[in-house]
Image: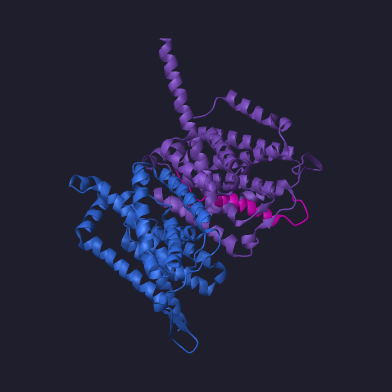
Amino acid sequence: MTLPRSVLFAALLLLALVPSVASTFYLQLGAKIMIMAIFALSLDLLVGHTGLVSFGHAAYFGVAAYALALIAPKYEAVNFWLTLPAALIATAMVALIIGFLVVRTSGIYFIMVTLAFAQMLYAIFHDTKLGGGSDGIYITMRPELTISGFKPLDLENPVEFFYLVLILLGAVYIFLNYLLHSQFGRALAGIRVNPQRMRAIGFAVDAYKLGAFVLAGAIAGLAGYLAACQFGFVSPEILAWHQSGTVLMMVILGGMGRLHGAVIGAFAYVMLQELLSAEALFGVYAKHWQLAMGSLIVIIVLALPHGIGGAIDVFLHRRRVNSEASDD
Amino acid sequence: MFYLIQLLNAVQYGLLLFLLASGLTLIFGIMGVINLAHGSFYMVGAYLAYWLANATGSLWLALPLAVGIAFAIGLVLETTIIRRLYQRDHLYQVLLTFGLILVFEELRSILFGNEVHGVAVPALVNFSIPLTETLSYPVYRLFVTAVCLAVAGIMYFVMHRTRLGMMIRAGNSNREMAASLGVNISLLFTLVFAVGMALAAFAGAIAAPIVSVAPAMGNQILIICFVVVVIGGIGSINGALIASLLIGLADTLGKVVVPEFSGVAIYLLMAAILLWRPQGLANKS
């Protein structure tokens, strides 16, 4: 299911106007939501459109963030045009190696194996000195976006960073929308519904799954790169399994198998987290926001089987049916 | 002698993993539920042992109490929440039990704080057997090994020699058929879930004096249990036993040979086995 183009453009336009009214705090919050939306979109490609429930997706988010942190020298800004592709290629390579092993499994095995490999990467970054160990690494200066001396966007400026993230979110959304309507995307949909039949009619199912896995890894890498830019700090927690659970929650919350669902889910989750951890509202209990979040996750899974997006669809459908009935 | 000690440690760790992994694979094999909160019960067991041992002054009293409380929590969880997941997709089971992990972790943080706690080894088994002039082996580890072996033996007996075990195995291979032959599936599921939770808590409680009681302990061991279940083959108790011992060896060897990368050794083993047998060691393809 895709949104009508008019709604999409209206949403993009609305987002583009945010910097003219919002303070730096809300700009940063907005950028964070959009980064998480890119991350959730990449996971939805696997979970919602290919039927592969990856529970280790934070691994690719984290690898790209570490790639930037490891390339960046301490007191010098790196070149955006070199480091972004480098981070994406590194992420895609890791996704290719892990993907080659995991697409051989399916169902519940797939969930456990993806989680286990993500934890392997966590162990590597946590136990070795490679990325500063459990203390993590700082990225003191954001990458510089220059084209032969000309600098279209200054990433140190919160407004311009917001626009960069917005442009990339829009690009990822449009790309995935195009991809899912292509032959490749239709093959993925077929694999989600019935892999045996797809194999029987001659599709190399594992190759398609691997393609989706690597692509999703690379897009998660884009989100991870941007997150490392925004927070200026990378630690093993960025690829710990909490992060994988969080992004999966965003996909479910928004309703999987809908691209706009991933964006809605990211927005809902981050806002919910902000709300529950607000000391102004919950005082000393604010630091235990995960208790409320965990309980909410349990309730949402039990009460809203198709997420917020699904609930909205059901609501709209019911209204449409009602209005059609009253027209007669 | 050094290698004998490492071997004993490997077996002890492997059997502890088996207690946890067998509960995980039993719940998955019989009820079809993937339970991420399994690791949380390992943590619950360890913290209960720490708290009860301080309150009663004896780990011997704390052990059965911790197991009993975990069993009771398991009963409540199954009848109120887990029960609604049986017909749902694995994805939702993963997510809901992920939510439960957050709840358990925060409750732990509120009740016990975020420090690392130690539990004293009971005086009765608090001594070491000298192996050479410089090396000795703590008896408590031997005790843990023996108890884990005993529990594994009891499990084997119950599964293969009793009526209850017959019903569990019947439920494992064909739920509908077992139900139509008069097995009370609903009660059986509640029981299996609570026993699985009690086993995990028992593992945590008995390991508490060895591993130190720390916040992230449940999550770490859960992932390792997943590796065990993936290597052994889902739903196979025998596979879980073989895989647990393999992982115990790989982990211990890894720590001795390449300490920096010891965390990675077990995943390399998993990758190798996946290449060879994606369905696990014990399952036929």
Specify the segment rendered in magenta. Answer: A51-78
What residue lies at 77% left-to-right and 43% top-to-bottom?
A146
What residue lies at 22% left-to-right and 54% top-to-bottom?
B167
Residue extending farthest to the top is A328
On the image, the x and y values in percent for residue B185 come to 25, 47
Which image quadrant is residue B198 in? bottom left
Colour of the chain lettered A: purple
Could you tell whether A40 is left or right of A75 in the image?
left
Could you tell whether B11 is left or right of A183 in the image?
left
Residue B233 can be seen, yes or no = no
Q: Is residue A134 above or below residue B146?
A: above
Q: Is residue A4 above or below residue B184?
A: above
What residue lies at 44% left-to-right and 57% top-to-bottom?
B39
* Residue A144 shown in magenta: no
Q: Nearer the viewer, residue A38 or B224?
A: B224
Chain that is coloured blue in the picture: B
Residue extending farthest to the right is A149
Q: Count of labels shown?
A: 0
Residue B262 can be seen, yes or no = yes
On the image, the x and y values in percent for residue B78 come to 35, 48
